[in-house]
Amino acid sequence: MHGEYEVAYLASELDRLNRRERLTEVDKLSLSGDWLQTLLDRVSDYVFVKDRRARFVTANRQVALDVGLADVSSLIGKTDLDVHPLETAERFFAIEQEIMASNIPRIDFEEPSILANGQRKWFASSKFPVTGRDGQVVGLIGMCRDITDRKRATLLQQGQNKVLQEMAAGHPLEKVLETLVLSIEEQLDGVLGSVMLVDDEGQCLRPSAAPSLPGDYVALTEGIAVGPKTGSCGTAVFRRESVIVEDILKDDLWEEFRGVVTPFDFRSCWSVPFYGKDSRVLGTLGLYTRQVRSPTDTELKLAFETARLAAVAVERDRDERKIRFLANHDVLTGLPNRQEFKSKLEQKIDQSRKTGTPVAVVFIDLDNFKIVNDSFGHAIGDQVLRIVAERIAFVHNDDHHAIRFGGDEFVVLLEGEGANKTELAQLMARLRDAIVETIHIGELSFHVTCSIGAACYPEDAKDSTELLRNADKAMFEAKSRGRDGFQVFERTSPERSVNQLTLLEEMRSGLTGNQFFLEYQPQYNLVSGRIVGAEALVRWKHPSRGRLTPGEFISLAEESGLIVPLGRWVLQEACRQNREWQDAGLPPITVGVNVSARQIREAGLISDIRATLEETGLPAACLELELTESLLIQNAEQAVSLMDDFRNLGVKLAIDDFGIGYSSLVALKRFPLTRLKIDRSFIRDLDEDENDRSIARAIISLGRELGLCVVAEGVETAKQQAFLASCRCEVVQGFHFGRPMGAEKFGKLLAMTLTPLDAHFG
């Protein structure tokens, strides 16, 4: 109402003056009365009157001061073009001409402004057309309230949110830091920003994001040393504190770099270091101005907030790179893992199809390696695997690629002349001789032997899958001949094919003859100390070969398609048994069932699960499907759709053996998972390997970030349990808590669930 009163009063005053015919157009709109000017000058908002040509007729003192004039009289008769930068003046003129042409006011709209001194402001403006008695528009009255602080706070929040969104979406670190720098530049007038990162050795800096600095200058800052007098940023890292240089041309810290910075007219530079979780300096936020000055308290506070957000972005990027490395490399040996190998093999096969260059795969399997672990322990066994990996790497040259395929298996990929069968035989002989050399670990001295097999493309296979399979067959042929030997692939003999077919038929009979059974390995909650779940593991009681573990028959079941009926039986039996425990009054738990790639491709899997739950009466929340990491990534779109169907049924979903395959944080975020199971290879050396501890922390932190329950597999010691508890890992599974056991024994253990695990393992 107050604003409407002012408008009405000023309108009547303008109309009265317009009736004085002898006055000029400007004079017609002049207001008289010192009292009115005094009143307007006391208002902190802008208040002004303009004529039809957008010339100032009058204004209050705040308008004159902000445009750099000493008093209001100096403003009269001028337009915005005389007192504002061109872009701002043209925007004001266009809006005001539209208001006067339409005779329609604009009320409380947001209006940015750049003052003559370069300062940016935002206003909440209201502008009203003024008409005379004849109804014609003769001018305009404007009132503008400064909302700069509020607007900057909003823009800052928006900028920070955008940075967080880019981090969550997996954008490159440089893009995230660039958004962060642009965000702070939008807040500070005349300030240009940059982020520099410390190299791995902590000796020098490299520019990572400087979107507004001249490219030539950024190039000159590459590799600036960390030291006591190396500009603002290098010194800030050295001192581990903020360094404020208000005059670059006079400050001793810039003595050696004045020749670099002078051509670009920078006069001050303020640098704020930021730190990682381990207190190590990660980098610096540098802010430049072309004026000699120090930062205000507000500017310094904003710089500290921005530096902290930069630390979060850099830390997250480093964690993600660690996860990517883990996804593609074997932690124990540092060699590429199976997923990385398959990708590289596909590339070599594709090249071979075009060039005709032969490709070969060599499988190396250590003989009776279980004896090493059983005799000396897993720690010695792991050292043996590292030594073998080094010997394999030493034998093959730079044209060959070695990987750890899993367990005690290694693979070498060759191309060119070395992939011919004659050369392969010589290479395999050298590999065998190198591996069999005496191993010395502490006071121990012993030997390990190996069985080696090889196959060539295109001679032995039509694609990468067949090449791997045939190399594997050749290795098993070498093993069947007494081990400690090597074999180049030859077409499988009829007798060997019959053996495979025989085992397949025996498996079919075993399914109908109740030869398969399940064992259950307990999963404990580390907070409550109680059993919360179990993993169902299939076993085969073979009539002549005795008890067989999955490693001895699952691959054949998968290849033949028998995994589908076998998986259906496992699902039904696990659900039936879980319901039986509940009906006996035992505490409800979740039982996990492994799902294979072949089952995923079967259209009837969803209906099988639904029918099993209905038949057994088991609540869907008590069933968990465990899917491997590589299975999800192979066809992410299909996986997301199928997993949504699983979740709609109400069952839980876990990603199994996390870390040994390839994964993307963005892809993982899309999957509707409930649990993430850390592969046992990352847990095994927690007692003594700091690298494994760092990796475990990173994966557990990743799980929490994604809102997943984290399960650690393969926990075998109290120290591992204590470490995982300190990292807030929720659930554990392993020999320390219980080996896989029959349903009856597990039921008795579950009946004791009211007693926390500390009572058993404390």
Image (spheres, helix red, strand yellow):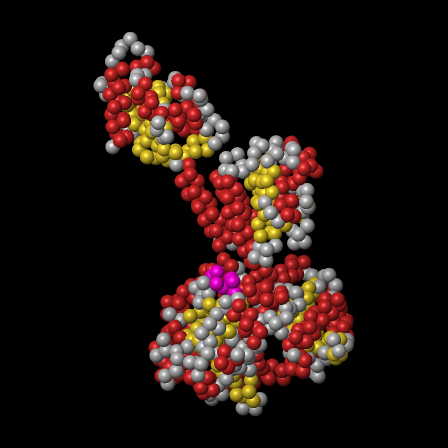
Rendered position, 484 above or below 682 = below
Q: Residue furthest top?
A: 22
For the N terminus, the quadrant is top left
Rendered position, 489 above or below 63 = below
Whether residue 565 can be seen here: no
Q: Name the residue nearer the viewer: 168 or 408.
A: 168
Where residue 230 sits, quadrant-wise, is top right
Q: Is residue 739 left or right of residue 448?
A: left
How many marks can you see?
0
Q: Main secondary structure of the magenta part?
A: helix
Pinpoint residue 723: horizontal percent, then vertical percent.
Answer: 56, 70
Whether residue 672 can be seen here: yes
- Residue under the image location 66 percent in, 75 percent down: 379
Pinpoint residue 117: horizontal percent, then vertical percent.
Answer: 49, 28
- Residue under the image location 48 percent in, 60 percent down: 705
Specify the segment rendered in magenta.
700-706
Q: Name the residue nearer the viewer: 274 or 534.
A: 274
Rendered position, 118 above or below 574 = above
Pinpoint residue 370: horizontal percent, then vertical percent.
Answer: 65, 80
- Residue under the image location 26 percent in, 19 percent down: 13
